[in-house]
Amino acid sequence: MLQQVDIQTKLKNLPDEPGVYIMYDADGNILYVGKAKVLKNRVRQYFHASSNKTEKVLAMLSHVADFRYIITSSEADALSLENTLIKKHTPPYNILLKDDKQYPYVKVNLSADFPKFIGTRKLAKDKYRYFGPFTQGGIKTYMDILSAAFPTVTCNFNFNKLPKNFRPCLNYHIGKCPAPCVGKISKADYRKIVDRAVAFLSGDDTEVRQVLTDKMMSASEKMQYEQALTFKRYLEIIDKISQQRIVVLSKLVDYDMFAVASNGASCVVNHTMIRSGKVVFSQNNAVSDAGIDEAQTLSSFLAEYCDVVKLSGEIYTNLPLPDADELSRLITQKSGTKTSVYCPQKQDKKRLVDMAYRNAVEYLTKSQTDLDKKFNTTHGAVLQLKELLHLSVMPKRVECYDISNVQGVDKVASMVVFTNGQKDASQYRRFKIRTVEGANDFASMKEVLTRRFERMKADDGVFGKTPDLIVVDGGLGQLDYARRAMEECGVNVQLVSLAKREELVYTLNGKDPIILPRNSYALNLLINIRDESHRFAITYFRKLHNRNSVKSVLQDVEGIGEKRRIELHRHFKSMDNLRAATVEEIASVKGMSRTAAEKLYGYLHEK
């Protein structure tokens, strides 16, 4: 809880220097992080009565109780520090781009003796050359097209250290690798294949069309119709890609165009990518940002976005950015490519930026309702949840736990995570209940949370970051056992429970429930995370129960040992599938004989 401060007095004492400012709410939670060339001028704009403010800025200011600032030696340092603080604190009113949601690329080390093409979603400053992003068809399809048209190595062997009797793998025999490992192709000829693949990835699809067409016709003539259809599908995907590639320039240049459009309530940034003189990518990004103007929003967006997409050395924007030079240096530092940020005024570059702006405006116009809904159901719901439940910490990371079993058998639990109001599936975890006998959901909940809290105390990263709020499925009973686990472990985390039917919320502040408005985004968020935890627990329970039921039934069958039980479960997955199988299907399972299959079939159909 922050002490009462006189904001007007602090505004008068702001320095005439560059730096970063941080907005706080009354509980000390960070709401927004911004940068400024002159702190005095920028921060005062937020609190100046006559300045025009967007709805997002007004919404944020209604929660602001204090601000602080950090003076930096230059505006470039302020930009870098702002970027670092946003990633660390994930303030709800800043642009938040997830690093793990990057676009797919293809990378290749062209300096290797026999270069290999690799699909990736992570960009790095390394020896690889990156192509992309690829949004049509998916990265696997691109890799399949490359493999079909331009066969190259896919293995990780060191060709200089292979044994003398080494044989080429299956890919060589099916035409997907030229087998340089055993000298089936020279470095020079292999390099020609790589150069042709690079030309395709760079936008020249002439040769790949011819190669795939020839392969399709050849497969059709040999009556290999399924393979012919595969090549036909690849050609259709290339057609779709070509439709997006509109020739716009006579020069083979690489540009990135960014345009921001806002109506006060919502904001959209369009990225139009030009590669080899063609538009190969156009993406509209709905953003939530409490910057005082669109130029500040676009600048903050670019500082984050360059971590997600590999940009060219020339970036053009629809607005002049006051910190363009500093932004150029930051992107250069992050990408390893010398980059410049400009606002073009005429000719082709201006025309392309205007095209990006028109796309942003159209998306903003058509998607206004969806944009508002997305904010209200994510960041807005998080803010509302804090207010309605009187939480002391902004619940940016919410974990929910649920128990699943049938009559105490195969007891499991789930942990699902919502970050900033959205599913964060990579953080989900599941548990087998170890110490509880019978169907005791209360004790099971205590065991699971005890294990979670012990990991948290040990600073074990297996479960991710420390939760801001834990939700348990149930009423006062489940909440009480969750509280006991917390107290016994000596930790302090905000805890609530959500009871079914009436959807009542119980907290540690008393026995009376909090009844959230039925139409509130906060309640909808709690229901969604509770239902997701239930789904995740049930899925794990069924998987475990099916596996155990197969093994337990087969224990009584003569001739079916542990190895055969494992293979039968791996093949059929459930008892229903096993009972529906024929003797021939059972006998085809690894390790099974015809005699054993007949005995098992008879046993299953006598019961």
Image (cartoon, helix red, strand yellow):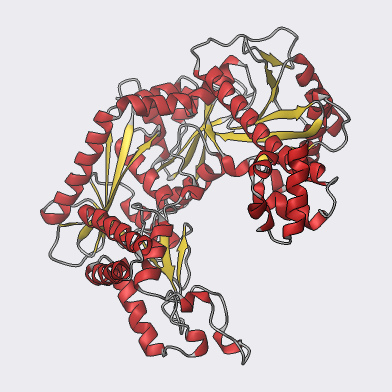
Q: Position of residue 112 (x, y in %)?
A: 46, 81
Of all residues shown, which one is farthest toward the bottom?
164
Q: Is residue 187 above or below residue 402?
A: below
Q: Is residue 169 above or below residue 400?
A: below
**Quadrant of the image for the C terminus?**
top right
| Horizontal relation, residue 415 to residue 551: left or right | left
Of residues 476 and 537, the one drawn nearer to the viewer in this rendering: 537
Q: Position of residue 502 (x, y in %)?
A: 62, 9
Q: Position of residue 583 (x, y in %)?
A: 67, 51
**Quadrant of the image for the N terminus?**
top right
Of residues 445 and 436, the one drawn nearer to the viewer in this rendering: 436
Which quadrant would residue 419 be assigned to in this image?
A: top right
> Total number of numbered labels?
0
Q: Is residue 439 shown to the viewer in this render?
A: yes
Q: Is residue 213 above or below residue 272?
A: below
Q: Is residue 47 shown to the viewer in this render?
A: no
Of all residues shown, which one is farthest toward the left?
347
Which residue does the image show at 29% across and 60% down from the upper left? 232
Which quadrant would residue 388 be assigned to in this image?
A: top right
Of residues 397 and 584, the one drawn nearer to the viewer in this rendering: 584
Which residue does the image show at 63% across and 27% down from the upper left? 393
Q: Is residue 141 above or below residue 499?
A: below
| Horizontal relation, residue 410 to residue 572: left or right | right
Q: Position of residue 365 (x, y in %)?
A: 24, 29
